[in-house]
Amino acid sequence: SYITNQKIDLLNKIGFVWDRNANNWIQKYKALKEFYDSNGHSRVCKNHPNQVLYRWVGKERTKYRNYLQGKRPCQTEDQFHLLKDLNFMEGKSISRKNRGGSK
């Protein structure tokens, strides 16, 4: 079974989300953009009321670093540039080589 172009058009007209992952990313990005617009930075603190945003930012920082280093998982080029426009890594290390420190 397949879906006709007419059905695709009808679904598009009502705002059907074809790519749930991309839509989820955009929603979280919009929340970060609002945070950035209000605070002038993208450093969501650990005790921020929106813990989903705080955790998402942490995961996206790893993906951002991976993008720069050509590793996976990483962001798409569009995602990378959207975050870069929010000074996403301002005050953060791009490299995580010495994470955890030495004793």
Image: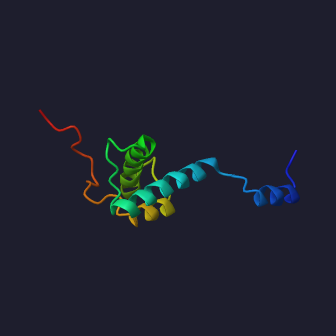
Which residue is farthest bottom? 85
Q: Position of residue 10 (x, y in %)?
A: 83, 58
Location of the C terminus by quadrant is: top left
Q: Position of residue 35 (x, y in %)?
A: 40, 57
Q: Position of residue 66 (x, y in %)?
A: 39, 51
Residue beneath the point at 87% across and 59% down: 6
State left or right for residue 23 relative to residue 50: right
Q: Is residue 50 above or below residue 14?
A: above
Q: Is residue 84 above or below residue 100?
A: below
Q: Is residue 49 above or below residue 37?
A: above
State left or right for residue 12 relative to residue 70: right
Of residues 71 and 92, the one drawn nearer to the viewer in this rendering:
92
Q: Position of residue 37 (x, y in %)?
A: 40, 64
* Count of residue discs: 0
Residue beneath the point at 37% across and 45% down: 58
Residue beneath the point at 31% across and 47% down: 45
Which quadrant holds residue 11?
A: bottom right
Residue beneath the point at 14% across and 36% down: 102
Of residues 103 and 79, the one drawn nearer to the viewer in this rendering:
79
Which color mode does the image show?
Answer: rainbow
Location of the N terminus by quadrant is: top right
Which residue is farthest left? 103
